[in-house]
Amino acid sequence: MNIERHGFIVKSSNPPTIEVDQKAKAVYVRFTRAAVAKTVSQKAELSHIAIDLDAKGGVIGFEAVGISSFSLHALLKMASVKTPNMDFSRTKYAPTECVPA
């Protein structure tokens, strides 16, 4: 599988919700609750990054797996996601758990 490096820009100014699953060592940074049309794998050294896009190519959110601790700045950089208009002072954090299939 060949994974390329892409850059993404979030146009919204709404702060994200960060969903943290400590057991799975996973974080999902959600910018909007839209239907996922495409998921793009992003090359990263220490974790797996997957960016969810809507039908118009807008960033819905991204997942980082293999993360035991993080800063939002580092996650955005690993995912190559830029948020030029975002106010992170109202970011929400929510614990979550993996549900077995």
Image: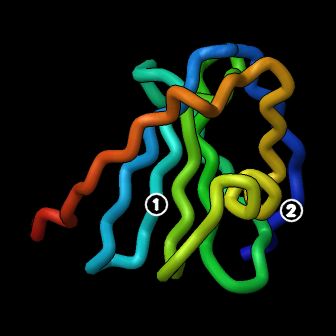
From the viewer's perspective, is residue 24 above or below residue 21? below
Is residue 37 visible in the rendered structure shown here?
no
Which residue is identified by label 1?
A: 27
Residue 4's label in the rendered image is 2
> Extreme left residue here?
100
Residue 43's label in the rendered image is none
Can you give x and y, in whole percent of width and height, for residue 49 in the image?
63, 63
Can you give x and y, in whole percent of width and height, for residue 23 in the image?
27, 79
Residue kind at label 2, given as amino acid type: Glu
Quadrant of the image occupied by residue 41: bottom right
From the viewer's perspective, is residue 19 above or below residue 8? below
Residue lying at 80% horizontally and 18% vertically, measured from the top left: 85
Q: CA distance from mark 1 to mark 2?
A: 21 Å
In the depicted view, which residue is nearer to us: 79 or 84? 84
Residue lying at 86% horizontally and 62% vertically, measured from the top left: 4
Question: Would you call the spot at circle 1 few (<14 residues within 10 Å), some (14-19), or many (20 or more)?
Answer: many
From the viewer's perspective, is residue 45 above or below residue 74? below
In the depicted view, which residue is nearer to us: 48 or 96? 96
Question: Would you call the spot at circle 2 few (<14 residues within 10 Å), some (14-19), or many (20 or more)?
Answer: few
From the viewer's perspective, is residue 79 above or below residue 58? below
Residue lying at 63% horizontally and 78% vertically, measured from the top left: 47
